[in-house]
Image: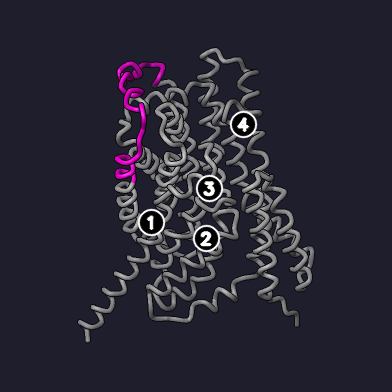
Amino acid sequence: MMDNRFSHIEISLVIGGTAAVLMLAVLFNFPLAAAIVPGFLMLTVIALKKGYKSSELWQFSITGIKRNKNIAWLLAFIGVILPTWYYSGTIGHLNDLFLSLISPEYFFTAAFIAAAVMSLIIGSAVGSLSIIGLPVMGAAEALGIPAALTAGALVSGAFVGDRTSPLSSSFQLLSFSVELEQRKQLKTIVPTMLISAALTACIFFVVDQIVDKGSAGASVEGMNVNELLTGSLFVSLIPPLVLSIMILLGKNMKLSFSAGIGSAAVILLFRGVPVSEWLYGSIFGTGALGGFQGMFPFIIFILIVGAYCQIIEDTKMIQPYINRIFRDTTSLPKNTAKTIGVAAGVSLISPNQSFPILLAGRSLLPFWKTHFSKEHLARILADSTVVFAGIVPWSLLAILCSTILSVPVLAYAPYAVFLYLTCVVTMLYSMRKSRQAKKTVSAAS
């Protein structure tokens, strides 16, 4: 009988080797698509030596590529939509509108709240940053406000909805992996979100009082919102409004982004932008907006990552070792801490968000369902696995956030405080639930 269990050394070689090369690629600006190849080849060779057939690994890879194809499409659409919105005047008008409404004294707090509200509406960190990220970053640059701090506030807000909104793909994926009905999941994960978001807003409020914004006040003082409330502004707001409504109505990603691009294309043509200039900018980029060409390397990367993660999942490479960690069947706080640790570990070795959610959810579900509850597992993973993807430098989601905001992951990560607070809050929440359970037992006895 074939023994296809992976040893500690083999797992360390695959995971450690992959992570090390990806880290080097991020630090030295090396193409991630090329950096993932050594780890993928190492994983394939070891799997073949364990007795898996090449046809099996090929099928695993195809399944993973198909699973990630929608993310690849999203990358392509983002590459095109941002230059199109630039040429249509949408980004410029949104930037002016934000500058006219925001007070520099509360800039970071407002940026966090705006991103949080948008992400809750459309259910996507990437979508919310695509819509409001650029104008807010433009406002920060115009006001002389630190870009890394602004990006941290925006990413913090973007992940409020990414983990919580029923429209979010990570919300749906988590619901599937822990086998929890969506309304129950929403009821379960909202309390820790509200606490974490409130604490985050308070932190950014304090930061607003501390950070010297230089001449920001003078920059905003001369702006009059009434001057912006024109027909031209309302026309410019049509593309993000169309995109938001389409996503809110539950339309698929391709149709929603196509509508956002199409409506902006009509506007830019009406405003006299040459078709050749728009097409060139959409493909090759304009200014800080990279266009489709700038996104293409990431598209290749995510497809390879899909194959890589699927092989790990289907060969059950690390699941036996995860199972050994959870032996205490009575302490909710201890198992919460262990689950956060597993979530962090899996997130660090995964360049995408879906793999850690699926792997952690499916691997830990039997234990949590037997000894505690699926609701606890859903809450803990929402407050750890789902949000960690925004601060792991080689994670696709973090790379997308970085690309949209034009701020390196390592630069904004220290300021994305919501992504750290959630796991602290969920740990304290488990401790409180544990004390309540003990009191109930004591009262009953």
Q: Is residue 439 highlighted in magenta?
A: no
Q: Earlier in the sequence, mark 1 or mark 2?
A: 2
The residue indicated by pointer 3 is 410
Side of 185 where 202 appears, left or right: left
- Element under disc 4: helix
Q: Earlier in the sequence, mark 1 or mark 3?
A: 3
Which of label 3 and label 4 is nearer to you? 3
Using the rendered image of the protein, determine whether residue 242 is visible from the camera's viewpoint.
no
Side of 234 where 263 appears, left or right: right
> Which residue is depicted at the point 70% across and 61% down?
60
The residue indicated by pointer 1 is 421
Q: CA distance from mark 2 to mark 4?
A: 30 Å
Which amino acid, by three-letter code, is at mark 3?
Answer: Leu
Near-viewer residue (115 or 190): 115
Side of 85 where 111 appears, left or right: left
Magenta part of the chain? 204-233
> Which residue is depicted at the point 53% across and 67% down?
362
Which of label 1 and label 3 is nearer to you? 3
The image shows residue 140, relative to residue 330, as above or below, that is above
The residue indicated by pointer 4 is 291
- Element under disc 2: helix
The image shows residue 322, relative to residue 19, as above or below, that is below
The image shows residue 163, relative to residue 290, as above or below, that is below
* Quadrant of the rendering where the C terminus is positioned: bottom left
Using the rendered image of the protein, determine whether residue 39 is visible from the camera's viewpoint.
yes
Which amino acid, by three-letter code, is at mark 4?
Answer: Gly
Which amino acid, by three-letter code, is at mark 1?
Answer: Leu
Q: Position of residue 194 (x, y in %)?
A: 31, 53
